Amino acid sequence: MRGDLVRKLAARCLSTGLAVLAFVVVALTGATGWGLALAVAALVAAAAEQRIRPGADLVAETALISAAVLVGYSRRLDDGLDPALVATALVLLGLVLLVGPLRTAGNLEIRAANLPVRSWAPVLADHLGAVLLGLLAVVGLAAALALPVAVALVASVLVAAGAGAVALDLARRRFRPTAGGGAVGRALRRHQPEFLLYFSAPPGSEYQVTMWLPYLERIGRPFLVVLREPEFLASIAAATDAPVVYCPTPRTLDEALVPSLRVAFYVNHGAKNSHCVRFTQLTHVQLHHGDSDKAPSANPVSGIFDRIFVAGPAAIDRYARAGVRIPAEKFVVVGRPQVESIEVRHEPVRGLAHPTVLYTPTWTGHHADADYCSLPVAEDLLRRLLERGATVILRAHPYTAQNPASARQLGRLTDLLAADRARTGRQHVLGAAARELTLAECVNRSDALVSDVSGVISDYLYSGKPYAVTDMRDEGDQFVERFPLAGSAYVLHRNPSNLDEVLTALLDTDPLAETRWATRRRYLGDFPAESYAEAFLTAARRELVPARPLATSTPV
């Protein structure tokens, strides 16, 4: 999070600073060429800011850049007051002032992918900011080359005409809506979806959806994905053939929830979930996006759902242990279908000379009570693993880069492994290569795991292989009480005093091999390996069966 803030602040300062400097240089000095060059640099910085801060308000920057370009254009021509240049200035001013409101209006419209509908106006409205920057670049180039002002005017009028068409279409949608609902609603009614996957989350959270899509598709019924943030539309639509609908407001959500729907699935406890839970005609099912002993995995908000699908009985106990009272009938044990592709090692393998160890540090969390990250002490761990001849798969949490300190720590670990790979030839897997592998592939390649408290441990448990877990608060016996998964793990203290002892148990003697199988049943259910995912599929299909109406007695 702090890393994101730093990047956004830096992008803002750079684009604003260059825009101001460009205007000052052009307006107050005779260095017109330098001023136009600075204006181009400001445009590049503004484009970068748009990528870092989608939806950023660039009115001030674009106004200053426009002024700098137009003043520079006037000086290049040196023909006095040119009516065409005045007209160009007025058109540009109108565009600068309209881009923000049009983008806002467009973002209030429903959008869809994987449906036979075309909603061109909201899409164009979302890209008008980039179009304006491109137009300013064209006008700046025309100024630098001293081209006739008509070139800039024609380009500006063409863009303005497009913006006007977008404005008219958005106004029509708002003030004269189509009878019987919009095109997206009509297409969804033809599609007849029986359930939906509802998703709202911060950027970078697509994995929460993509891990479930293959299993939702295997249910064998038509469905759709409802998104509440626009940045997920393209990536999630590319991961499925099901319709994906972006609903920015409760009004657009009303349009997407067509009468054929019976069930809504959720993968997190996002605040906007309440916008969908209010539809009482649906059965609302929480799936989660992993199973772990972290505090968020026993969120009291789970109580708002009609069903809570959990991997095993341990998840039900976790709520009770946290003092969260939820009726037992809401819980359904369905296993963790994502582990079905993990290869199971039924017998322990001890004394490996060159083991492969998967290390999966988690992130620092939104709050202090969810910070289990071991990156600050990981360098000693990796050095000892390398001394033991281990090959390391380093797979960090997707949110790691949001914290600058964590990003730097991860960078040092990456450099350490890269240097060892160059020196010894051991094929460590790190960086982008590690993210390209699925978690199941990482598990299958490894002989043991070192992890922080996270959902990775539950998935790894399915393999039957040994794992170590980090106790970053040095809680001792209380650590196992708080995180029962650690009962069948080799617990690594924050103080690395027991590091050699833990690595010997993990990679050589493995005294907890039998204990892990009992833990596996409690956390992942006791389902046959050959049909493991069927438990989830059967439970999901059961929720889709329409409730039978109560029989009424006929008066005699």
Image (spheres, rainbow, N blue to C red):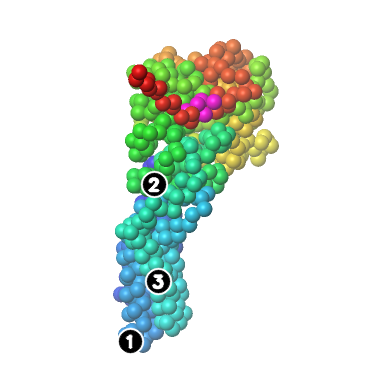
Taking depth in this image into account, of 102 and 2 the one nearest to the observer is 102
N-terminal of the pair, mark 1 or mark 2, is: 1
Q: Quadrant of residue 438?
A: top right
Disc 2, SS: helix
Residue indicated by mark 1: 80
- Are dots 1 and 2 in contact, CB under 8 Å? no
498 relative to 320 in the view: left or right: right
What's the magenta region? Answer: 538-543
Q: Quadrant of residue 157?
A: bottom left
The alpha-carbon separation of the residues under discs 1 and 3 comes to 28 Å
Residue at point 38%, 73% (across, down): 69
Disc 1, SS: loop
In the rendering, at what x and y percent does residue 490 appear?
53, 18
N-terminal of the pair, mark 2 or mark 3, is: 3
Q: Residues within 10 Å of mark 1 (few under 14, many from 20)?
A: few
Q: How many marks?
A: 3
The alpha-carbon separation of the residues under discs 2 and 3 comes to 30 Å
Type of residue at label 3?
Ala
Disc number placed over residue 161 in the picture, else none:
3
Type of residue at label 2?
Glu
Taking depth in this image into account, of 247 and 357 the one nearest to the observer is 247
Taking depth in this image into account, of 208 and 484 the one nearest to the observer is 208
Residue indicated by mark 2: 255
Residue at point 36%, 25% (across, down): 303
352 relative to 297 in the view: left or right: right
In the rendering, at what x and y percent does residue 94 appear?
32, 70
The N terminus: image quadrant: top left
Q: Residues within 10 Å of mark 2 (few under 14, many from 20)?
A: some
In the rendering, at what x and y percent does residue 123 appear?
44, 58
The vertical placement of 327 against 147, above or below, is: above
